[in-house]
Image: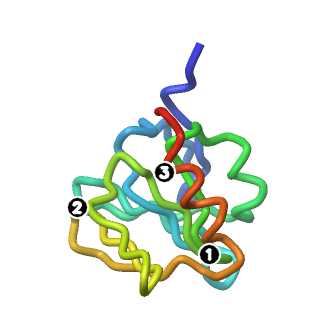
Amino acid sequence: MRKKTLLLECQKQIQRIKLKDICYLHYQDGIISFYMVDNRRLLHCNTLKGLENKLTNNFVRISRNIIINLNYLSAYFKSSHKVTLVTGKEFTVSRRNVAHFTSTLTLDR
C-alpha cells in the first residue's frame, strides 16, 4: 500500500499533509520548509535524511538542501543541470546527485 499522507509536527501542532500536495522541501538552519502547491509553507524541525525515508518514490533529493516532487517537475536542462518546477521555481541539481536524479527520471514510473 502506497503512503499518501505524512504526519508532521509543524509550529507546535501535528498536521496530516497529503504527499501529493507537496511541491518541494527546502532545508535551512535546522528547519525544513514544505512548499505546498497551494502556496502554503509549513515548517518542520528535522533533517532531510530523517524525512527522506518517509517520502514516496516520486520525491528525489537534488542537492544537500532540496527534495522535489517529480509530479511537479516541468523541465530538466542537462547542460546546466537545472530543474524547473511547474510553479516556475528553479533549482540546480548538485554534481553529487545528477546521476541518481537522471536515473530516477529514466525509470518507468
Residue at the spot 56% in from the left edge and 20% down from the top edge: 2
Crowding near the residue tagged with mark 2, few <14, some 14–19, many ≥20 C-alpha atoms within 10 Å = some
For disc 3, the marked residue is 105
Identify the mark at residue 63; answer none if there is no mark. Answer: 1
**Front residue of this view, candidates 31 and 91:** 91
Q: In whole angstroms, how far apart are the C-alphas of marks 2 and 3? A: 16 Å
Residue at the spot 48% in from the left edge and 33% down from the top edge: 108
Q: In whole angstroms, how far apart are the C-alphas of marks 1 and 3? A: 16 Å
Residue 83 found in image quarter = bottom left
Q: Pointer 1 and pointer 3: residues touching (CB < 8 Å)?
A: no
Residue at the spot 49% in from the left edge and 27% down from the top edge: 4
N-terminal of the pair, mark 1 or mark 2, is: 1
N-terminal of the pair, mark 1 or mark 3, is: 1
Residue 89 found in image quarter = bottom left
The amino acid at mark 1 is: Ser
Q: Secondary structure at mark 1?
A: loop
Q: Is residue 82 left or right of residue 101?
A: left
Q: Position of residue 60 (x, y in %)?
A: 57, 55
Residue lying farthest to the top in this orientation: 1
Q: Is residue 25 left or right of residue 99?
A: left
Front position among marks 1 and 3: 3
Q: Is residue 13 left or right of residue 109?
A: right
Crowding near the residue tagged with mark 3, few <14, some 14–19, many ≥20 C-alpha atoms within 10 Å = few
The amino acid at mark 2 is: Val
Q: Pointer 2 and pointer 3: residues touching (CB < 8 Å)?
A: no
**Front residue of this view, candidates 64 and 35:** 64
Q: Position of residue 20 (x, y in %)?
A: 38, 38
For disc 2, the marked residue is 86
**Front residue of this view, candidates 26 and 59:** 59
Residue at the spot 59% in from the left edge and 53% down from the top edge: 103
The amino acid at mark 3 is: Leu
Q: Position of residue 78 (x, y in %)?
A: 43, 75
